[in-house]
DNA sequence: TAGATTGTTAATCGATTAACAATC
DNA sequence: TAGATTGTTAATCGATTAACAATC
């Protein structure tokens, strides 16, 4: 009865596809059309969606507005999510300046760092807090999601503290496999690993 | 005979694990130790490695220096890779400033943008080139890897041009599913999709 | 040697696909 | 109605795991 993780991971892609088709002015779509757009099979899309209900009509396809709404409901994206950011380096700065997360309903509400030179300094609309105050701040803010943007050497320690403080999902930018209780979700942003696996397929000669 | 993609994608994690154990001063390891480190099963690690040869010794485990060397060889990481970057926005700046890629043998050798205000301006040690010169520059430089850091709306068009120009692997930071010939590898850096699938598991209340 | 751990086989498990009855 | 496309079943495919002989 519980839906495979691999299906859940595809739902945001379906949502993105639905939005793109809507922006083209379309009102309905088919599993076939989405499949071409995403490079998947139409059977897979129908099967994935069938885990959550019946969203289409035989012979007609899917109403885009309805599917959009349902996917957001399933993924709990019909609300705003507050996140804390740990690590006020270059990456942290870029994440705060970029509007990408906010546009999609993910808002960074606090930034932490361990460097005394950074603590107390403004960062965008926020002020960098001392990482020593992590636990109490997280409980105060009620955040459930954290972005981990600290050096590799500090990542596991900070991640454990985040888990202890009640954080339930971590977006990990550190190049480290985190060891955490299974109830804490981890999404790993790991461009180097992607590069290092793509080179397998490239001829080593120029 | 050809190795499943999912196995290839784990090799860089094995390599990272090997390096971490070496930094701890260890000289040998076991599939069991690596499994704990990475949160996988020891059988999976042994099976994955067995696709490429016999790297261990029964009763003894794996010599870390040897395994390190072999993994780098298999992944073609025993050389330097030159990459071109398309998109000189905040993200592009952060990628150039960060030493992460260079440390691992991936060097950005050219930056392109479409904005006339950016073209000709310095960006770190490079000068931003006109994206109109993409094809000729890529052929000249002989780059096989590109980083795509342009807005969503431009991503597909630029990606197609990269493929035409002979690029064989794209690290895609744009929130778009790229449609490309199957011989072009794509690695998708997609933090929003990770966030949007993690929220499925979070209670929508508080 | 005795103990340990690999490499590999066979069994299990899970995900994808093909096909089609249901039905809009 | 006729044509199209869903939702679902059963078959296929592939990946993971358990177990163990080989052997260091």
Image: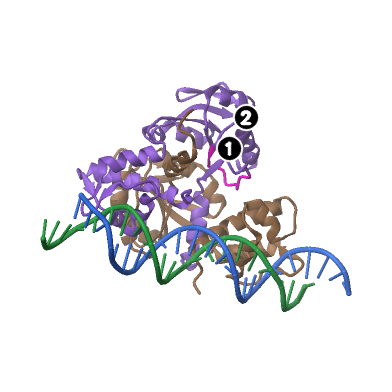
Chain colours: A purple, B brown, C blue, D green
Measuring from the top left, give residue A133's x and y in whole percent.
62, 24
- Quarter-of-image position of residue B33: bottom right
Whether pointer 2 and pointer 1 mark residues with C-beta atoms closer than 8 Å, the reply is yes
* Residue under numbered circle 2: A114
Please report, as a chain letter, where disc 2 is located.
A
Q: Is residue B62 left or right of residue B98?
A: right
Vertical position of residue B95 compared to residue D2: above or below? above
Which of these two is toward me, A177 or B125? A177
Which of these two is toward me, A94 or C18? C18
Vertical position of residue B72 compared to residue A140: above or below? below
Q: Which residues are magenta?
A: A169-179
Q: CA distance from mark 2 to mark 1?
A: 9 Å
Marks 2, 1 in one chain: yes
Mark 2 element type: loop
The answer to if A195 sits in the magenta stretch is: no
Q: Which mark is residue B157?
A: none
The answer to if A175 sits in the magenta stretch is: yes
Measuring from the top left, give residue B140's x and y in whole percent.
37, 60
Measuring from the top left, give residue B183's x and y in whole percent.
38, 65
Vertical position of residue A31 compared to residue A147: above or below? below
Measuring from the top left, give residue B99's x and y in whole percent.
54, 45
Which of the marked residues, 2 or 1, is nearer the chain's N terminus? 2
């Amino acid at each position: 009865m519980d839906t495979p993780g691999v299906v859940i991971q595809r739902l945001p892609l379906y949502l993105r596809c639905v939005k793109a088709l809507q922006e083209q002015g379309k009102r309905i779509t088919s599993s076939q059309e989405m499949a071409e757009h995403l490079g998947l099979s139409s059977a897979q899309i129908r099967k994935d969606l069938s885990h959550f209900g019946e969203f289409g009509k035989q012979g007609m396809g899917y109403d885009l507005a309805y599917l959009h709404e349902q996917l957001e409901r399933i993924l709990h994206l019909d609300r705003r999510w507050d996140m804390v950011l740990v690590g006020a380096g270059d990456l942290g700065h870029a994440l705060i300046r970029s509007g990408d997360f906010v546009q999609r309903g993910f808002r960074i509400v606090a930034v932490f760092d361990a460097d005394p030179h950074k603590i107390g300094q403004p960062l965008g609309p926020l002020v960098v807090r001392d990482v020593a105050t992590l636990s109490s701040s997280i409980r105060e803010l009620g955040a459930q999601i954290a972005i981990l943007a600290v050096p590799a050497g500090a990542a596991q320690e900070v991640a454990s503290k985040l888990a202890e403080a009640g954080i339930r999902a971590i977006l990990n930018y550190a190049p480290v496999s985190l060891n955490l209780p299974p109830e804490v979700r981890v999404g790993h942003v790991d461009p180097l690993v992607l590069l290092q696996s793509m080179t397998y397929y490239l001829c080593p000669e120029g």
